[in-house]
């Protein structure tokens, strides 16, 4: 029977032929004595649109038997009662991956109904258990780790799977799709198209290429493109999830009819990839600055002021970040700022925060400067609020921050009047 079909499915398949197609078969035998039986197709070689007359009728007879067999073997009322309970039970067992829970649940429900795990997967997909899509995938001679996603991320007739045949077609026909890979913003895993980011994919070498990371396996909706299946239930092509072809070695293509790009999703993922690249570059920049800073507070303050420049709206030019400029932004005197740059003078938390906002330091650099001043935010509501301003409003003015502090009844920073 191969990996997909089960004896029970074969029996149900033939019962449907006997019940629904017996007269059709008798007429067919009268017209053509060489036709002695209806065969269970191994795979959908052609679509019904390419067939005519008797051949098309035979195709539909096979499609109907395939579609109804699983419904007879696993009625909705029983499947919907059993499957969620099994999933809940499996979640109480420690598995490494959430996808393992789905595969183990499908294995168990398959045993309950006496069918193969692939038939259980097909029935689960028919009944709307979308995350079953990522289970039991056999691609290029090997099984893939199961993946999961937020079921709400997939609309009707949508999938994350893209077989190689359709990948090549889209790559050749859609310039916007090809551009994703030419820019190296995305990679094709042989069955999924994923953002090229180490959070989601890891490179295993020339032989194995890219694979999803643990995080990627758990968040496919966050990092992989969606594709629209180009047929609907009311079209003559039928619904692939109603088809259960026997004696079939399942692979990604088995669940992949012609795919079209979900343009909106692709645009969202492209923007996400761009933002992640910007974040990555910003991380590299900030960490490089941090590694080059001296250990002292005065040395660090001095280093920041030397590397920064300031915009002068009067001349429409950028120039050196002077003591005067920082004094204007913080309300602290030039002499005091000069003293802080040259001596390890005791400085208050409020003054350091004013300096951080005045220089618009990245939060990581601000916390570094605060730590080197031997200060820290207290473990109370005021400390929490101050930390929030440093984290989320470092590009705002000190006047803005002091307005927020004053409104909460907290001490203001520097000498800028809110």
Image (cartoon, rainbow, N blue to C red):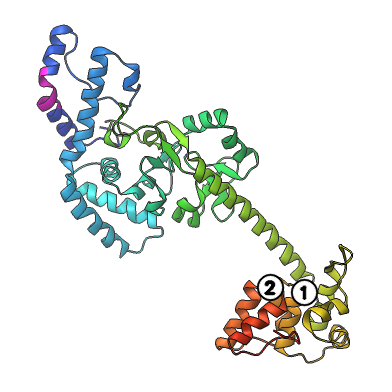
Magenta segment: 17-23
Q: Residue at x 73, y 90 (%)?
A: 348
Residue 383: say if magenta: no
Residue 225 versus residue 294 in the image, above or below: above
74 vs 97, left or right, is: left
Q: Give the label on residue 394, or none.
A: 2
**SS for callout 2:** loop
Where is 280 relative to 142, above or below? below
Residue 22 % position (x, y): 11, 21
Q: How many neighbours does mark 1 have within 10 angstroms: few (below 14), some (14-19), or many (20 or more)? A: many
> Which quadrant is the C terminus positioned in?
bottom right
Which quadrant of the view contains residue 307? bottom right
Of the two numbered discs 2 and 1 on the same chain, state the one appearing first in sequence: 1
On the image, the x and y values in percent for residue 210 come to 55, 45
Q: Quadrant of residue 62?
A: top left
Residue at the image point whose x is 67% and y is 83% from the top: 402
Query: In the orientation shown, which residue stands out farthest toward the bottom?
Result: 346
Between residue 400 and residue 178, name the one nearer to us.
400
Q: Is residue 186 above or below residue 151?
A: above
Q: What is the spatial separation of the Cα atoms under label 2 and label 1, in whole angstroms?
A: 9 Å
Image quarter where the N terminus lies is top left
Main SS type for the magenta part? helix
Give residue 97's position: percent from left, percent from top.
Answer: 41, 58
Q: Is residue 339 above or below residue 301?
A: below
Quarter of the view holding residue 75? top left
Residue at the image point whose x is 60% and y is 40% from the top: 180
The residue carrying mark 1 is 359
Residue drawn at the location 75% of the way across and 65% of the way down:
288
Asked if residue 9 shows in the view, the reply is yes
Mark 2 crowd level (few <14, some 14–19, many ≥20, 10 Å Cα): many
């Amino acid at each position: 029977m191969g990996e997909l079909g089960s004896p029970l499915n074969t029996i149900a398949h033939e019962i449907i032929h006997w019940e629904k197609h017996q007269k059709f078969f008798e007429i067919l035998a009268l017209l053509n004595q060489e036709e002695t039986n209806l065969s269970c197709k191994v795979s959908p070689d052609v679509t019904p649109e390419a067939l005519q007359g008797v051949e098309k009728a035979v195709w539909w007879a096979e499609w109907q038997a395939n579609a109804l067999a699983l419904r007879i073997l696993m009625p909705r009322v029983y499947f919907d009662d059993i499957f969620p309970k099994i999933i809940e039970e499996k979640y109480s067992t420690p598995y490494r991956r959430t996808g393992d829970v789905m595969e183990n649940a499908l294995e168990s429900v398959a045993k309950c109904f006496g069918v193969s795990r692939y038939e259980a997967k097909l029935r689960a997909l028919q009944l709307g258990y979308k995350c079953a899509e990522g289970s039991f995938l056999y691609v290029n001679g090997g099984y893939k780790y199961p993946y999961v996603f937020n079921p709400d991320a997939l609309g009707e007739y949508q999938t994350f799977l893209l077989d190689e045949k359709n990948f090549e077609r889209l790559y050749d026909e859609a310039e916007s799709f090809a551009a994703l890979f030419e820019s190296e913003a995305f990679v094709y895993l042989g069955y999924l198209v994923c953002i090229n980011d180490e959070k989601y994919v890891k490179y295993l070498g020339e032989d194995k290429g890219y694979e999803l990371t643990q995080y990627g396996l758990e968040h496919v909706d966050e990092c992989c493109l969606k594709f629209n299946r180009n047929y609907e239930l009311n079209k003559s092509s039928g619904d692939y999830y109603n088809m259960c072809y026997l004696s079939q070695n399942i692979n990604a293509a088995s669940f992949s009819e012609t795919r079209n790009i979900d343009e909106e999703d692709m645009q969202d993922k492209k923007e996400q990839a761009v933002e992640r690249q910007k974040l990555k570059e910003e991380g590299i920049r900030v960490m490089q600055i941090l590694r080059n800073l001296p250990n002292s507070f005065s040395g660090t303050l001095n280093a920041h002021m030397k590397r920064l420049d300031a915009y002068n709206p009067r001349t429409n030019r950028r120039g050196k970040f002077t003591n005067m400029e920082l004094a204007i932004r913080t309300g602290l005197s030039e002499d005091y700022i000069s003293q802080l740059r040259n001596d390890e003078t005791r400085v208050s938390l409020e003054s350091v925060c004013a300096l951080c906002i005045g220089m618009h330091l990245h939060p990581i650099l601000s916390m570094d400067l605060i730590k080197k001043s031997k200060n820290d935010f207290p473990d109370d509501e005021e400390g929490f609020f101050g930390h929030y301003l440093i984290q989320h409003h470092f590009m705002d003015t000190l006047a803005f921050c002091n307005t927020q502090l004053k409104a909460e009844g907290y001490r203001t920073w520097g000498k800028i009047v809110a």
